Amino acid sequence: MMSHPFARTEILLGAPAAATLRDRYVLIAGVGGVGGYVAENLARAGVGHITLVDHDVVSISNLNRQLVALHSTLDQPKVAVMAARIRDIHPDCVLETRQEFINTDNVQSLLTGSGAEVVADCIDAIACKAILIQTAQTLSLPVFSSMGAGNRLDPRRVRVARLNQTEKCPLARELRALLRKSGASLDVQTVFSDESPRRAAPPEEVSAPGGRAKTVNGTISFMPAIFGVLLSGIILQHLLATGENRNSA
């Protein structure tokens, strides 16, 4: 009889590898469609320290794709809802929540203050993504990034590649331009779709504090989930590989 929540993980990885995940620390920027699945999968795998960063609250338009979005959670901070969900899954996980909009003024303190050793970039504002990635690189923090899941429908076209190898992703193209301009590296592992995106709706104003007008993308339930599951998978592979290096040192 299985005696604890991570027994099946130990069968797959071995007890020592599974145990190393309890000591690892990941910061997740954005806990919406993609980031919610990253957070949940890292927690279910046994990652012991997680910081959740998101300025937004749950809205009714989130119900079609986000783990945090239920009628019972409308208007609640996404970081609070996600933290409560993680505590119900992995009570021993050490959680920090920051209801903030990432910008040039706070990004360095968020990264250094959290103690995180890996960054999951799940935000959709391009300028903020660039700031986050560039700052993580200056701090020698590995960063794994999600590109655009919106306006796509074909799950077979989702890929994992370095940022300089992505195709047919306007977000990735603009992000590369910003990173080149700032002198940052494009050697960032990403999840993206090489499906040609469908047309977005016109931009609309964002009412949340710190928000900006942004293009409204069409979304479907499963695409952000696929992106988030893949991103959590490559992050976990990184944690396991570097955990082996720690153990052999």
Image (tube, rainbow, N blue to C red):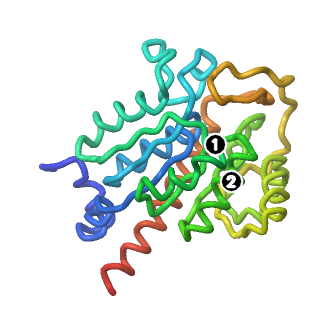
Taking 100 as reference, is 204 left or right? Answer: right
Taking 151 as reference, is 61 left or right? Answer: left
| In-front residue for pair 95/90 | 95
Q: Residue furthest bottom?
A: 249
Q: Which three-letter amino acid code belongs to the residue tagged 2?
A: Ile
Which residue occupies 67% across, 19% down?
A: 207
Q: Based on the displayed image, in which of its 4 quarters is residue 8 positioned?
A: bottom left
| In-front residue for pair 61/176 | 176
Q: Residue furthest top?
A: 71
Q: Which one is closest to the eye, mark 2 or mark 1?
A: 2
Dot 2 lies on which element?
Answer: helix
Q: Which three-letter amino acid code belongs to the residue tagged 1?
A: Ile
The picture places residue 81, in percent across and down from the top left corner, at 41, 27
**10 Å neighbourhood of mark 1: few (<14), some, or many (≥20)?**
many
* Mark seen at residue 172: none
Among numbered discs 2 and 1, the one appearing first in the sequence: 1
The picture places residue 158, in percent across and down from the top left corner, at 69, 50
Q: Based on the displayed image, in which of its 4 quarters is residue 133 positioned?
A: bottom right
The picture places residue 59, in percent across and down from the top left corner, at 58, 18
Find the distance from the CA under tag 2 to the CA under tag 1. 11 Å
Which residue occupies 79% across, 51% down?
A: 194
User: With respect to residue 36, does 172 lie above or below?
Assistant: below
Q: Based on the displayed image, in which of its 4 quarters is residue 213 positioned?
A: top right
The residue singled out by tag 1 in the image is 123
Quarter of the figure that contains the C terminus = bottom left
Dot 1 lies on which element?
Answer: loop
The residue singled out by tag 2 in the image is 131
**10 Å neighbourhood of mark 2: few (<14), some, or many (≥20)?**
many
Which residue occupies 39% across, 49% down?
A: 50
The picture places residue 153, in percent across and down from the top left corner, at 74, 36
